[in-house]
Every structure is written in C-alpha cells, then in structure tokens.
Amino acid sequence: MLLAAALAAAANPVRALAAVAGGATVALVTADLESHVVAVDLSTGRVAKRIRTASGPRSVESSLYGKVVVGHVPAGVVTIVDAATLSVRAVLHGFDEPRYTAMHPGEPLAYVTDSGVGQVVTIDLDRGAIVHRTRVPGPARHVSVDTGGRTLWTALGSAAERVAALDLSDPRRPRLVRVIEPPFLAHDVVFSPDATHVWVTSGVRNALAIYRLAGGAPRVLATGAPPQHVSFVLSRAYVACGQDGTVQRRRLDGHPIRTTRVPHGSYNVTCAQPEQSFGRSAVVTPSLNEGTVAVLEPSGRVRFVRHLTRSAHDACVVEAG
C-alpha cells in the first residue's frame, strides 16, 4: 500500500514525499530575482517544488491555519499559498510596499506591514481578503505577534527610531496603543516563546535589546554585525548576523552559547518547531548574497547547505502533503 501510494504520487514531488513520509516538512524559500518560492525538504535538502509567483517575492510567513503569505515589494501584491498542496490560492492587490507578515496564533489572520503607506494590514486567510488597515507613525517593516495573540510590535523602518505596539483585543482591527524609542536604531522585533519578553535587534550597531513586557528598561547585549534577525525553538534563541555569516545560539536571557558559520548574507532566520516537523526541530537561514539555504540542528550543528537560486531573502517552515 505504501509503495503503491508512492508510485501513484511520483509525478508530484510533494505528494511523493508525503506518501513516503506521511507528510513532508519543508522550508519555503524566496527566490527574489526569479519570481518563485522554493520548497526544500528539511530532512534531505531535496527541492520538492518551485512555486511560481508574482515578481519579487521578498518575504514569506506560515500560519497555523494552513496558509502561507508571500510579500512582493516591487509588485505591490501579496500571494496566499496553500501549505498542504504548495499551490497559489489567491493574489491580493491594493498594497504599496508589502514587507513582512506576522500571524495570529488563534485566528486565521495575517498582519502585513505596508511600509510605503505606514500601515499594518489585516488579512482574513480563509476569505483571502483584506479586512482592515491600521495606520502607524512610520514605514512599518519587521513585525511580531505574541504567542497569546494579545499584542503586535513592528519596527517603523529598517533602522528605526521608533517601534509601534498595537493592541489585538479585536484581532481583526489592531489598535495603536504605544510608541517605543529603542536604545538604538531598530531592525527586527520578535516575541519570546513565553510572551514575557521582546527581542529588538539593531539596524546599525552590534547590539540587541531584550524588553520585559512587564516594564522597565531593556537589557542591551553585544552581538554580531547588523542588521540581525531572531527566531526561537526549544527554549533557545537564534540570532542571524548575515554580514558576519554567523548564527548565534543563545539562552532566553540572551547569554551566548555557540556561534555557527553559515553562508555570507544569511540575514533572516526561522525555526521548525517540534510539532511542525515530526519532533525534529531545525533552524533555517537563507542567504540574500549566495542564494543558499542553510539548515541547522537546534544544537547549532549544520545539517546541510543547499544552493537554490541567485538570491534568497526569507524563509518559513510548513508541513506539506
């Protein structure tokens, strides 16, 4: 039965992977200059599929509700991809510069930063429709939602003087409640897994700041070259410093544990959580300069590096098949 299913699905690489493995965990990696997103099997490094999209896919983020959002800054559109089939479900127009996406953990909602008009745009993923636009006082870029779905933070620029905090009491209509001035020009913002802290990286300094949501001044720590990006898995933080070509493994208090060499230009970073990947976590970082994707074990050991395209800006993780 298993062999027959695999043979029947052989014409479709994603279905073939699913037939053999009962579902494949893949990284979706943007091919920025070639108008597609690459699906890479996290166990083998095999390219499962290349998903054709509008021009300039620059960011990609996955939802717990089986959808993926791709932002295309040059085209001013957002693509919604079905995670199970790795196929395009909708293309949404009406954006100026759609940059990055954060997902609500308890609703099929996506929040896309539109930096060209200073907005956070709410998308209903089931309907494939824009349902609200929230104005913020600057060009919103990197964005994060806490694991309880209560709060959203977004950096107002690539090297931002301010970070906006939005209340998600009504998750379809975020409300600006606070503007934070970080101790340096900020770049990335990411909530910790326990939703008690926010990590803010710098666009200009070898530093990151850890904020306590309960209040107080942030702790500022030394790190690699800017701009840095952050992701979390298994009670560890991973800080990608693309200019240095490194990924730092840190404790949740920010203490450094290990530094791993990765291809130069590996700026963004994302993680496969155990529940996404059949109990096997991973750290994924694409290279804008080299067009590679590096996949690391949670320990920091390199699992594999694959060349995929001319330039790879962002990645996310989904379970396909």
Image (cartoon, rainbow, N blue to C red):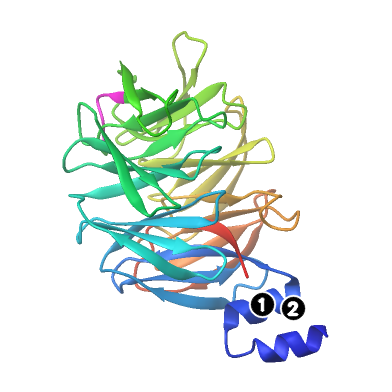
Name the residue carrying label 1: 17
Residue 296 is situated, as x and y percent measured from the top left of the image, at 62, 56
Which secondary structure type mostly characterizes the magenta part of the structure?
loop
Q: Residue at x 24, y 28 (%)?
A: 136
Q: Is residue 219 left or right of residue 319?
A: left
Which residue is situated farthest in the top direction here? 216
Name the residue carrying label 2: 20
Q: Amino acid at mark 2?
A: Val
Per the rendered image, the range of residues in magenta is 159-163
Residue 252 is situated, as x and y percent measured from the top left of the image, at 62, 29
Q: Is residue 232 above or below residue 173?
A: below
- The answer to whether the residue labelled 1 contacts the one labelled 2, judged by CB atoms less than 8 Å apart, is yes
Q: Is residue 289 visible?
A: no
Please tell me in which quadrant of the rendered image residue 160 appears: top left
Q: Amino acid at mark 1?
A: Leu
Q: Is residue 296 visible?
A: yes
Of residues 226 and 13, the one drawn nearer to the viewer in this rendering: 13
Residue 299 is situated, as x and y percent measured from the top left of the image, at 70, 48
Question: Of helix, strand and loop, which one carries label 2?
Answer: helix
